[in-house]
Each structure stands twice: as C-alpha cells, then as structure tokens.
Amino acid sequence: MGPLVETKKEDTQRILKNLKVYLGKKKSSPMVFSFAKFFSKNPFIILVSCLLSLRSKDVMTIPVCMKLFDLAKTPKELLNIPVDQLEEVIRPIGFFRKKAIVLKSVSAQIVDEFGGKVPRTEEELLSIGGVGRKTANLVLSVAFDIPAICVDVHVHRIFNRLGLIKTKTPGQTEVALAKLFPKKKWSEINELFVAFGQNVCTPTSPICSDCPIRFACEQRGVARRR
C-alpha cells in the first residue's frame, strides 16, 4: 500500500471527526435519520421515507411522510389505503402517482414474500421491485445497524470534489469508499455527507468559507464559491 493511499486514509478519519463536530453544533440531520430516531428505527418507515425522498427535497418530503405515517406504519396498513387516497396524501412531492404504485408494490411483496417484515439482507432488499442499492444500503445501515455505504448525489459529488476519489458512477464511488474507510465507519458516511451537502458543500457555489474540511479539499469542479 503506497504512501498516497495511507495519507488519504488518515485524511478520512480527520474528515469524519471534523464533520461530526461541525454538524453537531448545527444540529443538522437528514430526514431519514431523523425519522429513524422518532420512530425507533422502524424498518418499514425508513424504507418508505427513502422511496418517497427520491428526486424530492426533504422540506417537501417530511410533511408528506408524517401525514402518511399517521395512516400507515406497516405494509399491511399501507395496502389498506385506497390508491386514490394514497396519491392525494403524497401529491405534494414529485412523481406522486408512480411513487404510489411503487409503495403498493413494495408493501405487497414484503407481505407476500417476507411475512410482512422488511428483510435485513442486501440480496433480499434488492429483490424487491423499486428498491435500488442506495435505498437498500440506507435501510441496512439505519434500520438494522449493518455496515453499508449509501451513495447518493451528495456523497458522490463531495468525495470527487475533495479529490479523495475519481469516479463516474455511484457504484464506483461505493467501491472506492469501501477501500478508504474501515467497515465500522461505513454507516456514518451518508448521514454526515448528506447534511454537509445540503447545507454547506452545495452543488453550485459551495460555502467554502465555512467548511470544516478545507484542509482535505482540492475543490475539483468548483467554479464559484462563497
């Protein structure tokens, strides 16, 4: 293992430590992690909130999820909601008709194939229609405390911006990060970097002046900064 790889691994430990301190002061936590605390890590609620959050901002998704979870907290309860009522509940977020179909399908598959309980293995989660690697890894890590790296747009963008990796796809990023971080740290990555990406290291014009990990950043692709 070369000195450059060792240096990057040392940087990752400092990065995580700095972000924990910084975001702890800001009391900033992404939606799924807030729901996990509020609903005692209910796997189905975590899964549904992940599915509803796809291509939708937290500020829109949170009230929709809370309204839905007043009606259903289990797959069977969700299946009992008429489709037109479900569509009306989730209408404020994008692609609500398609997401209503996915929620119904996912709930039915969980009931039919897994006894009404969200499975706790990657293979089983990925066998559910509508569940991709990002969602599966987030459910594994948040609901079941199983080490997994959930790569969303923030995680993919920021690590490439830092210069710690050079990847083109989320799948490549997951593999690269698994080599940089010890397994016991995998589940911390998404929570820290999503909150950081939403509030500081934004897609355009990141707030570099208030960045706690500037020491490790090459600012790749950054044209404008604050």
Image (cartoon, grey):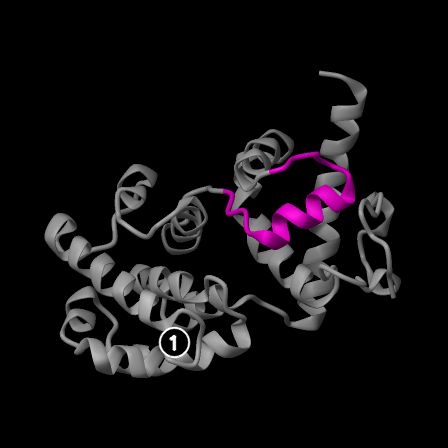
Q: Residues within 10 Å of mark 1 (few under 14, many from 20)?
A: many
Question: Where residue 203 appears, x then y in whole percent?
Answer: 71, 59
Q: Is residue 158 left or right of residue 140?
A: right
Asked whether 30 falls inside the magenta stretch, the response is no
Question: Where residue 187 appears, x then y in whole percent?
Answer: 52, 47
Q: Is residue 130 left or right of residue 225?
A: left
Toward the viewer: 99 or 148?
Answer: 99
Q: Residue furthest top?
A: 1
Q: Answer with the quarter of the image where residue 77 lies.
A: bottom left
Toward the viewer: 146 or 78?
Answer: 78
Quadrant position of the C terminus in the picture:
bottom right
Q: For the point 82% across and 59% down, which residue is it? A: 211
Q: For the point 21% across and 59% down, which residue is it? A: 105
Above or below: residue 70 compared with residue 48: below
Question: Where residue 34 appears, x then y in whole percent?
Answer: 49, 69
Toward the viewer: 96 or 124?
Answer: 96
Q: Answer with the quarter of the image where residue 159 lies.
A: top right
Asked whether 166 falls inside the magenta stretch, the response is yes
Image: magenta residue range: 149-168
Question: Where residue 69 appears, x then y in whole percent?
Answer: 31, 77
Toward the viewer: 101 or 9?
Answer: 101
Q: In this figure, which residue is indicated by the disc labeled 1?
A: 65
| Mark 1 element type | helix
- Number of numbered discs overlaid on the protein picture: 1
Q: For the point 36% across and 78% down, which residue is it? A: 90
- Amino acid type indicated by mark 1: Cys
Q: Is residue 162 left or right of residue 86?
A: right
Quadrant position of the N terminus in the picture:
top right
Above or below: residue 200 compared with residue 110: below
Above or below: residue 42 compared with residue 115: below
